[in-house]
Amino acid sequence: MKEFLGIGGYQREPEGYMSWQHLTFVTFLMVVMVISAVYFGLKNRSLDDKRKNKVLLASAIAIDTVEIIKIIFICIASDEPFDRFLEELPLFLCSIQLITIPLAALAKGRIKEAALDNVFMFGLLGAVMGTYLAGNNYSAYPVISLDNVASGITHSISGFASIYIGVSGLISMKKKNIYINFSIISAFCVVAYIVNRIIDYNYMFLMAGDGTPYDLIYNLVNGNKVLYPLIVSGLFLIYIFVFYYVFFGISERTNKNKKKKEEAHKEEICHV
């Protein structure tokens, strides 16, 4: 248990990013995530939103509980607990779900709608990026360690919430809430950038790629300290716009096909 918690530092060598241990572990999490989200989503699809929301509330409690426990033990195990605490703030794209899932479960009105949109758009993306593409974590810590197990679970809960919202029918996705999600991501980027400058860290990966796909952008602009964070921030906003655009396009086409089928059915009845 002491070794799992990393007290005194991990004695085991990390198995490595994209090792079979890494891929096996995160694939197991993803399979459980998808199956459970689809199961509960289909099971609750015919229920009212209030009862559907109970699963989302449980997800909110679970993700924040796991994260708080992780932070407490990581700080206890560290020789510099305060510095380590500053490195665990919820200022990564994936960790925004620590805030937006509770908002999606507990808030009302447009805040709830925007939070549902945010979880739906970023939950699954964060789950994949924070597990399969988390090169910085799996290069630094053993696969079965507090850092990686807790991180894997929280990212899986984010993905679960995203899929559950879609399958259960809790989706909001209204055009009037696009600017709210622009504001949420922009605010996180600004705060993350300021914190990065103060404590010399890399929240939202605005300072460097750190073994993630953001390295491609970092290398493309030769690590330019102005262009790199602007491009990364811009990509978040572009992703939101494209996600809404594609969603509305698919919804519009689906509705048109549905109307055509209904009209065709009415004509058949009339002919009879």
Image (cartoon, helix red, strand yellow):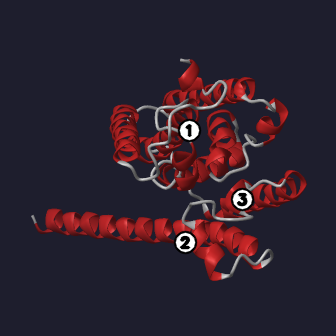
* Residue at which label 3 appears: 185
Q: What residue type is labelled 2?
A: Val
The mark lying in front, picked from 3 and 1, is: 1
Work out how far the residue at label 3 is from the one at label 1, CA to CA, in angstroms. Answer: 21 Å
Q: Which of 166 and 85 is in front in this view?
A: 85
User: Circle 3 — which element?
Assistant: helix
Q: Position of residue 253 (x, y in %)?
A: 38, 71
* 156 or 205, nearer to the observer: 205
Residue 36 sits in quarter: top left
Q: Is residue 31 visible?
A: yes
Question: Can I make out residue 172 in this image?
Answer: no
Q: Which of marks 2 and 3 is nearer the N terminus?
A: 3
Residue marked by disc 2: 242
Q: Quadrant of residue 151?
A: top right
For mark 2, give the secondary structure: helix
- Residue farthest toward the top in the current orientation of the protein: 1
- For the residues labelled 1 and 2, the Cα–Cα distance comes to 28 Å
First reached walking from the N terminus: tag 3 or tag 1 = 1
Is residue 30 left or right of 226 when viewed as pictured? Answer: left
Q: What residue lies at 47% left-to-right and 38% top-to-bottom?
A: 143
Q: Which mark is residue 151?
A: 1
How far is mark 2 from mark 3, CA to CA? 15 Å
**Residue at the (69%, 80%) spot, across then down:** 222
Mark 3, residues whose alpha carbon is within 10 Å: few (<14), some, or many (≥20)?
many
